[in-house]
Amino acid sequence: MKILGISAFYHDSAAALVIDGEIIAAAQEERFSRKKHDERFPVNAVRYCLDEGKVGANDLDAVAFYDKPLAKFERILKTYFSVAPKGLESFMMALPLWLREKLWIPLDIEKSLESCGVKCGPDNFYFPEHHESHAASAFFPSPFKSAAVLTIDGVGEWSTTAIGHGTGNKLQILKDLHFPHSLGLLYSAFTFFTGFRVNSGEYKLMGLAPYGEPKYVKLIYDKLLDIRDDGSLRMNMDYFGYLDGLMMTNEKFAELLGGPARKSESDITQREMDIARSIQVVTEEIVMKMAAHAKEITGEKNLCMAGGVALNCVANGRLLREGPFENIFIQPAAGDAGGSLGAALCVWHTVFDKPREADGVHDAMKGAYLGPSYDGEVEEYLKAKNYPARKLSETEWAPTIAKIMAEEQVVGLVQGRMEFGPRALGGRSIVGDPRSEKMQSVMNLKIKYRESFRPFAPTCCTEHVSDYFELDRESPYMLLVAPVRKDLWTNLSDEQKRLMKDPDLRKRVNVARSTLPAITHVDYSARVQTIDAARNKKYYDLIKAFGDLTGVYCIINTSFNVRGEPIVCTPEDAYRCFMRTEMDYLVLGDFLLSKKEQPAWQDKADWRSDYKLD
């Protein structure tokens, strides 16, 4: 049985294909359209999934859409009516879009399938609830035979948080929290107020938090929130603008926090750092309470998580260290993109009551390498473009690239299948030497063209993770933050201690706090990815070769893109990004390209204006 899952129309639209319960393919539309967080119907992602699964004209058995559009429309109408006459402007913007596009999803699905030469009628379309799709994306691919399930995001139809219980092929939602009270929307409100883009810049707020002090925590508790012991919350909507306006916060919110919201791209001040730290502290406390309640009502030792808030890897790391669960699995595409996969799995297991296998150890996500591979097309592409390149044999591939990295050269890496979800995991990554004191600023300012305070993540061989981090298990999807081992910390000089308190974030970033300075954040933490040969042999071999050469079985791994651009998909995307930046080398499959050997790049001077900054 072939089931296509789809998410669309809000942000991060995606498609996924499940055949007889096996996850065959999944990808976000943005990777093909080159529009970051593309919300449009995922025509290109659908075509890719059908091609990858070799789905013929009459082969598709079912299509699952990740939420119930009519229920969501009902929530939007009731919300506008409840605040009328306020909110008229936003209502007049939303209504035509719904009437023109979002209420015609079955027709869009049919047209998309027809354009791919595939037939599947509305009788075979299914619409799970939004948080049901999230929960299914977390539990069904997890390694656990049974588990508590916690999904937290902005809002679906009405639910903003849900606690569920999965056993075998059964998944039941036990409790949920309703709009407008939402931990996801609360965090997004603070994202907006600190000058970052909503549904895009939340991870920046998380990265900024360690630079600040939790000065606003009491104010948030006193004025903005009422939090119960079970983690449920009620927000004081007098301070928020998303019910009756076009912005997340209002003037009363600004007055409470001592002035207007930071303007995008303006200097980040200590106030923004303290605000970021404060809402991060509050978020972690709420997640801990929610998880404790999920444990209480399910009695499970395992937890599965999804929804946008599940991408807060600082909260995840704390939950793993301090929480009530022995094991945690987080869907790598935890946001709306992953809803496409969850919807398809929900139909397979719940609607058709198909069995599920779980061995307690291995998840079914295949390392999240579910996108297209172009390794077999690279040689033809390079010849057609006449780009100089050297083909590396299987035995020299990893040692050659490792040596380049050890010389503090930056390498763009495109090999194997593209990752599903927001993290680059070695398929579409930029890699470098974590021992380098200059690497973080070089990568941020000259390659990624992004804010200097942003940390870089490490990837290490799974068997070596405890050599560098206070982590005793694998973290294959870069969704856990763990402390760097204290024996790797450096003794700071008086001048370095002074710089650590400097209001200029760039000076703080450049202080070498450990023997792996490029991946050690200001609070001595790191967002860790582990890799083994089973998930991605070539990537594992590269890190092992780097370790054999340097003694450090750990490298820098950041996504292969510049700020505002989706992660690269094709060799053409990668080469363009390579030539626009100050990367030193590019690896396309088995081929190595040196920047010095490439022809002069012809590009318009203002290419960065093509990308909407997050």
Image: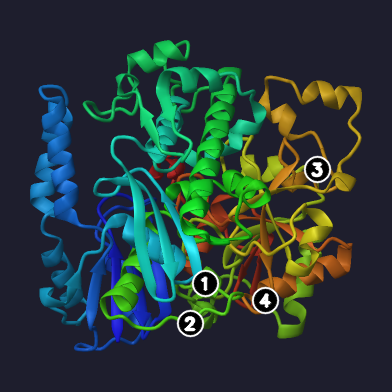
**Cβ–Cβ below 8 Å for labels 4 and 3?**
no
Q: Element at badge 2? A: loop
313 on left or right of 396: left
| Kind of residue at badge 2 | Glu
Residue type, label 4: Lys
Q: Amino acid at mark 1?
A: Tyr
Residue at (55, 36) in percent of width and height = 285
Element assignment for label 4: helix
Which residue has dot 1 on it?
369
Compared to residue 159, the image places residue 247 above or below, namely above
Name the residue beneath numbered marker 3: 437
The quadrant in which residue 596 appears is bottom right
Q: Quadrant of residue 43?
A: bottom left
Q: Tag 4: Cα neighbours inside 10 Å, few (<14), some, or many (≥20)?
A: many
Q: Residue at x 29, y 78 (%)?
A: 3
Marked residue nearer the N-terminal end (1 or 3): 1
Alpha carbon separation for disc pair 4 and 2: 28 Å
**Residue designated by label 4:** 538
Residue annotated with mark 2: 357
Q: Amino acid at mark 3?
A: Glu
Q: CA distance from mark 4 to mark 1?
A: 13 Å
- Of the numbered discs in the image, which one, if any, rests on residue 135? none
Seen at 68% across and 22% down, the residue is 504
Using the image, determine if residue 273 lies above or below residue 6.
above
